Amino acid sequence: MKDNAFNGQISGRKEIHAEDKIRFDCHPGVACFTRCCKDADMYLYPYDIICIKNRLGISSDRFLEQYSIQAIRDNPYFPSVMLKMSDDEEKTCPFLSPEGCTIYKDRPFSCRAYPLERAVARTGDENGRKVLYFIMRHEHCLGHKESREWTVTEWIEDQQIELYNEMNDLWVDIDSIFRANPWGSQGIDSPALKMAFMACFNVDVFKKFIFESTFLSRFDLSGEIIEKLKKSDVELMKFGFDWTTFFLAGTGPLCGFH
Ligand code: SF4
Ligand code: SF4
């Protein structure tokens, strides 16, 4: 399922609100079961990669190489990361089995949130965001004809997307830096882009960069922060976002440590 809502671009669709009801259900009994897991143009967000690579027990580096493609899409200054579909005739998701999704508990945000589409609009205040929701309808999806009803809030709880939302909101801020072409005349060939991509998407290589380079001699991080970075991929990714903000925009919490 495709969801590329995190760019603040909102077309003329009808917004729905937290307590509005949506009619939808998805279960093995629907005639279209797993139809959406084939030939899907699926964007992956940084936090998706942490969840799936840990589920598979592989490094982020290997995940990116084996299961993703990178392509310039709606942002001309930064590649989007997409799930690489199998090269069979139906272009099946590599995580699909005859019984359904083999990584269901760790499936990407787009698979969880559907049919909700979430857009984040920047309000102009510092860190200010306004979250908007819309409903997506794909013709092949019969889930919209099921009788079960949910409020938007209930759907978000049921699909356990709160942490995904929190991480994706942080990503919106970084993505908006990229959209302003921070690379200058070097464009997307800039070495700084490679660094930013690593810090945002390749958490295991970023960890090596933190702990196996001169980084810790240049940034005076507390023992508590260092311990968190050693133990938690989520903390590492948040730190990667802060690092990207610092070296591209010269702002953010890392200014205080340099
Ligand atoms: S990750 Fe799972 S739910 Fe998402 S497309 Fe693949 S098989 Fe389907
Ligand atoms: S109901 Fe929709 S989301 Fe569920 S399997 Fe069918 S196409 Fe996919």
Image (spheres, rainbow, N blue to C red):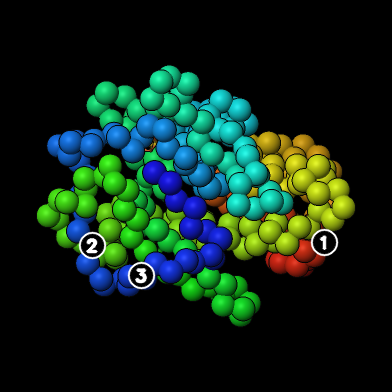
The three-letter amino acid code for the residue at tag 2 is Ile
Q: Is residue 246 above or below residue 68?
A: below
Q: CA distance from mark 2 to mark 3?
A: 13 Å
Q: CA distance from mark 1 to mark 3?
A: 46 Å
Which of the two discs, 2 and 3, labels the residue nearer the N terminus?
Answer: 3
Whole-percent x and y of residue 138?
32, 48
Q: CA distance from mark 1 to mark 2?
A: 49 Å
Query: Which sits in the foreground, 11 or 181?
Result: 11
Q: Please give the residue where the numbered disc 1 appears in the rendered image.
A: 258
The three-letter amino acid code for the residue at tag 1 is His
Verify CB contact (< 8 Å) between mark 1 and mark 2.
no
Q: Is residue 129 above or below residue 65?
A: below
Q: Please give the residue where the numbered disc 2 appears in the rendered image.
A: 22
User: Does residue 197 appear in the picture of this structure?
Assistant: yes
Q: Please give the residue where the numbered disc 3 appears in the rendered image.
A: 14
Quadrant of the rendered image holding ligand 1: top left
Which of the two discs, 1 and 3, labels the residue nearer the N terminus?
Answer: 3
Task: Tell me what residue is drawn at x 21 percent, y 45 percent.
Answer: 142
State which mark lies toward you, 1 or 3: 3
